[in-house]
Amino acid sequence: MRLALMCWLGVMAAYPAAAAQEPSPRAGFRFSPEAGATLRSLWQESVEAQQERVACLAADIRGDTVFVSRILRIEPDAADSMGISATASIERCGPPKWDGTVHTHVALYTEDGPSRRFSGQDRTVMRLWYGRWRSDGVFCIVYSERSAHCEADGVVGGLRSRPRVVR
């Protein structure tokens, strides 16, 4: 099962999640001040370069919330045309230190802006991450300075639905 929400990356101590299609009225994603600031910086860098950027993220499930505490940028290297190396994020962003990845979507998807959802290619990279680490993961797309779409596998209504590590 998967918890998927649109998130607002604000400037408060615990970033409130503005949810769309929440499985639970209280379930959500929140970002530490450090993680939120890093995501905004990652977005700005991505917009300036007109290339996607990627980072590792660390998250904990606390009651009905997925709390993203830390973000680690991955420098573009051996990247595709959008500036992302799937291999680097898969190898670098695994347990026990990291719980998944976040990346930016800057290319226009519609006249209104970038895609707000994971693409088929994004889902392939997520599947490769699962294959490598055999663990539930947390993944986010940042599509504006203050907005993201995040998903956490193994979470239903903010509660873990199965063991974290799958053998």
Image (cartoon, rainbow, N blue to C red):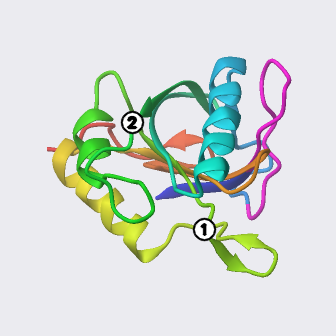
Element at badge 1? Answer: loop
Q: Amino acid at mark 2?
A: Glu
In percent of width and height, residue 34 lies at 66, 18
**Percent coordinates x, y for residue 81 in the rendering:** 39, 66
Front-lying residue, 61 or 139: 139
Disc 2 crowd rating (10 Å Cα; few below 14, some 14-19, many 20+) is some
Q: What residue is shown at x 58% (from left), y 29% (from top)?
A: 68
- Left or right: 114, with 97 as reference point: right
**Residue lying furthest bottom:** 110
User: Image quarter for residue 109?
Assistant: bottom right
Tell me what residue is drawn at x 62 percent, y 41 percent.
45
Q: Is residue 45 left or right of residue 102?
A: right
Percent position (x, y) of residue 54? 46, 45
Residue, disc 2: 75
- What secondary structure is the magenta-colored segment mainly? loop
Q: Residues within 10 Å of mark 1 (few under 14, many from 20)?
A: some
Name which residue type carries label 1.
Answer: Arg
**What is the x, y in percent for residue 113?**
75, 70
Pick out the residue farthest to the left.
167
Q: Separation of disc 2 and disc 1 at Cα?
A: 23 Å
Name the N-terminal-most of marks 2 and 1.
2
Q: Which residue lies under the disc numbered 1?
A: 117
- Height in image: 30 above or below 137? above
Q: Residue 124 versus residue 154: which sits nearer the camera?
A: 124
44 vs 153, left or right, is: right
Magenta range: 7-21
Nearer the observer, 17 or 156: 17
Q: Is 87 placed above or below 62 here?
A: below
Is 6 drawn above or below residue 155 in the view shown?
A: below
Residue visible at 70% across and 36% down in the picture:
40
SS category of the residue bearing label 2: loop
